[in-house]
Image: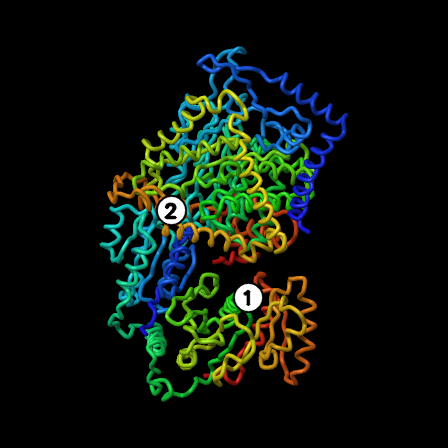
Amino acid sequence: MSKLGRVIEAVEKYNQHVLDEVKRARTEKRFGKQLLDRWDEIKRNIKVGRAPTGLELPRLALPEIDEPGEIARYLLGDGLPGEFPFLNGAYKEMYLEPLQETGSYAKNGHGKNGHGKNGETAVAKLQETEEPTRLFSGMGLPDDTNKRFHYLGAHQRSKRLSTAFDGPTLYGIDSDADGVFGKIGEGGVAVDTVEDMERLYAGFDMGAPSFSASMTISGPAPIIMAMYIAAAKRRFGDSVVPKLRGTIQADIFKEVQAQNETIFPVEASLRFLGDMMEWTTRNMPRWYPVSISGYHIGEAGSTPVQQAAYTLSNGFAYAEMMANCGMSADEFGPRLSFFLDCGLDVEYIALTRVSRRIWAIGMRDAFGAGARAQMFKVHTQTSGRSLIAAEFRNNLTRTAAELMLAYMNGTNSCHSNSADEPFTTPSEEWIRLSAHGQAILLDESGIFKHTMNMLSGSPGMKAVERAVEAAILEEFREIERLGGVLAAVENRYQRSQIQNAAHRYEQQIYDGTRPIIALNKYRDGAEEMPEVELVRTSRAKQQLQVDRLKKFKKKNAAKAGKALDKLAAVAETNENCFPALLEAAEVCSLGQISGRLQEVVGRFRPMV
Amino acid sequence: MAAPIRILTAVPICDGHDSAINTINLEFIRHGIEVVYLGYHRYAEDIVRAAIQEDVRAIGISSYNGGHVEFFAEVVRQLKKRGANDIKVFGGGGGTITHDDQRVMQKRGVDKIFFAGTSLTDMTQWVRDRYGKVPKRSGGKTPEMRLARKLTEIEDSYANGKRPKKKKIENRKSKIENTKVIGFTGPGGAGKTTLIDELILRLLHREPKARIAILSHDPSVVGEGALLGDRATMINSQDDRVFMRSMATRGQAGGLSPATEDCLRLLAQSGFDYVIIETVGTGQEAMPFQNKLVDQTVLVMNPDYGARLQLQKIVMLDLADIVVVNKSDLDRAKTAMSEIERRLEGSGREQKLISTVAKRHRDRGVDELCDLLGREPEKKKK
């Protein structure tokens, strides 16, 4: 049995445990009394706040129950916000404005300090001192992106930079390779060498507590990670390493299942990732070495249940991998974070809630994790796939509904898409509207700022929770039958499930069983698609990137050969190859390293 | 009945967005189109080579990661350079291709760009209308293209219910002396395609001048389309020394197409060092290769064939020259090897049994298999 099998057992067992305890609460007087006392105490400690209209409201809403069995069902089955199994939230309080009675009416960052380039607003914890905004960019050459980072961060105390890479970088290919010229700097920034990495973050204090970097890359993640560390060391010395803060996506399972940016065979990819995770967990205590992503699975066309099931099972597979490296669940657990898609299907009413619960039970009971490692911390993005080009202004409404669902689920941070995304890179006007959508929901409306659990636990939501949890467990069982996550991946189980779902979705649009307004319902035929200005990388810039790379290669030719030989030799063994990768990153290009490693472990064979 | 339209679809280099193309492929197939799917992250050069070898009417490119103006133009340019400008190029990129881009792309020779919001039905209809008429085409400027077009002629004759003019083929020697023809068969999911691709890697390396042809098959029903997807998973066979042709069975049972025999004969006469033919994954109740062109037959098995008794039903175990148990990293592989070994003892022939893990880089079993596929030394001299 793989660890996933144990997770299935753990959830089933826990659900039975809840039922048993409900029964015990009703039959054992002493236990019943304990629960009633605890319930009273919880209620007594709830503070009361006041809405701007003067209405008094509790900071935490609880179901109106006074019978021990129901209290047991609630406290054990759902848990209070911030308590196991975390159905109602990873933290005790989220999104709430400070109590009016206590202290000033100082607002949290969002909505006041402006938003990132793509309107990403995080609002996890009230006590957060830095702005919750991540500044997302990735365009042209490293200098261009760097300039953009400085522009976006000009008025922020903290610099939280999120980086998108261009196609060649995502595939571990050098900019001077044949056939990729037109792709240089398109859709993200081109990074070939440690020097590019230095240019990318020039002018930022990479070791400062107020600086953090997020890198959206998976296939060559260990190489890019090594270049990032090498760049930081060049500028700030070796002592900077333990201070580095940030995250790298590094989710190879979802690449193979959905996003297809994979360069090594799966097992070799996992080995390199494992090496990186082990090294960073031990040497960079403030780094998150993987972002387990369901977003791309959802966008590739999966159903919501598939998205949650594959993302969670991938997460458990990484946990198993790290446990196999000899790390304890409490060591690696808090380093795992998630990224989910939120669309308009009914499952999204409770998808993240259920995911949080399954993760907590699995981590506690199958991995022996403590409280901090049980928490499912998640960033949500509204669904890009749900947006359409026809009468695109409707996308504002779609995104607003999705935002509402995301916050109802207690997401730790959220990104709202721009209405113009179906046909262009988002423009300033629509980015602003999408970011303001979040501010209106959280700051302006009273829905989320006065009371925790404001929209948690309606009978309908409970019905969705039960159905979704059962369906996720059924997916787990199928994966387990196939031999676990890796075996299922190699059988292309997840891929084919996602593709079938995507095709069914298209058919439903075609036969009308899935109404899409202005597409297959209430369509008036008038097309409006504003012509937009695009950000493209000029040929001159692309040539500059190639020239710089060639110069770097010439300068380092002798050293590069030696470093690559050493790396290849370590890769042939079972040793952790991240230290050798760190050395190679000083003098070799991305393509040189990935090419040499491919000689040792082979290339990824695409699945259809 | 008219021959099905054959088109090739692909996603450009450094782009893994295959969700749209997968859905579009299925829609094309449902409407009778045979789709040679090359997969994602493909170089323009590989797309053009494949389109010429497969002799498709058009190439459909689904792009998302940018750089489309250059990429589409590069495909058109390379088609022209190779004298194949009668192969058309169309495609789309959701919202990433603007109307301005489209104008530039069409000026550079792209046939059509579909924008976001086009229905699958409209797209399929357009493709059928535009590429459905059998065009008057040149016989081909290069030997490779001429060969590809002759193969199309043969395939289409069968689809039209006529046998091709046999004389053209039979007048020549039945086979060129030093061409070795190897047939691969075995159940679906045994890993034939991966195994062949790994062998190609080794053959190209071992014989730096060798040229190899591959004839691969995927199932289809008469009058319907087919997904010809073997190329999408082959990473070593995208090479100028490899000529690959994907065929749909067009309703014929047994894992081959009605046109296979003639096509194979033509390939065997075309000066390749190796010709590899791969059947559809089927039940192994009979020898699929009836003609004498095949020098060596390889049966590729999956260790999970079920109960031992199943082996008695596999006639190919008596007929194959080499039996390969692939995926021998699976738990059942050891048992499978010994059961099959016992089974082969009954055949009374000298057969080789090899265990491989084709997906493993530098697998020793595949090396061993490759050694068995060498040509006879005396035949090596021209």
Mark 2 closeness class: few <14, some 14–19, many ≥20 residues within 10 Å:
many
Closer to viewer: mark 2 or mark 1? 1
Residue A432 visible in image: yes
Name the amino acid, label 2: Ile
Amino acid under disc 1? Gly
The image shows residue A13, relative to residue A600, as above or below, that is above
Residue A216, percent from left and from top: 48, 41
Which of these two is toward me, A264 or A102? A102
Q: Which mark is residue A184?
A: 2
Element assignment for label 1: loop
Q: Is residue A328 visible?
A: no
The one of A572 and A68 positioned closer to us in this rendering: A68
Percent position (x, y) of residue A193? 47, 44
Q: Is residue B287 above or below residue B97?
A: below
Please give left or right for residue A457 compared with residue B218 in the image. right
Front position in the image: B266 or A271: B266
Residue in view at x 51 percent, y 79 percent: B288
Q: Are marks 2 and 1 on the same chain?
A: no
Picture disc at residue B191: 1
Q: Secondary structure at mark 2?
A: loop
Q: Estimate how packed mark 1 is, as few (under 14), some (14 to 19) or many (20 or more) residues with alpha carbons within 10 Å.
A: many
Residue A444: image x %, image y %? 41, 21
Chain bearing tag 2 is A
Give the residue drawn at x 57%, y 22%: A60
Q: How many marks?
A: 2
Quarter of the image holding residue B382? Answer: bottom left
How far apart are the alpha carbons under marks 2 and 1? 36 Å
Q: Is residue B75 left or right of residue A36?
A: left
Mark sitting on residue A368: none
Point out residue A22 in the picture as x, y percentages from the top left corner: 69, 33
Whether residue A439 is situated above or below residue A490 in the rendered picture: above
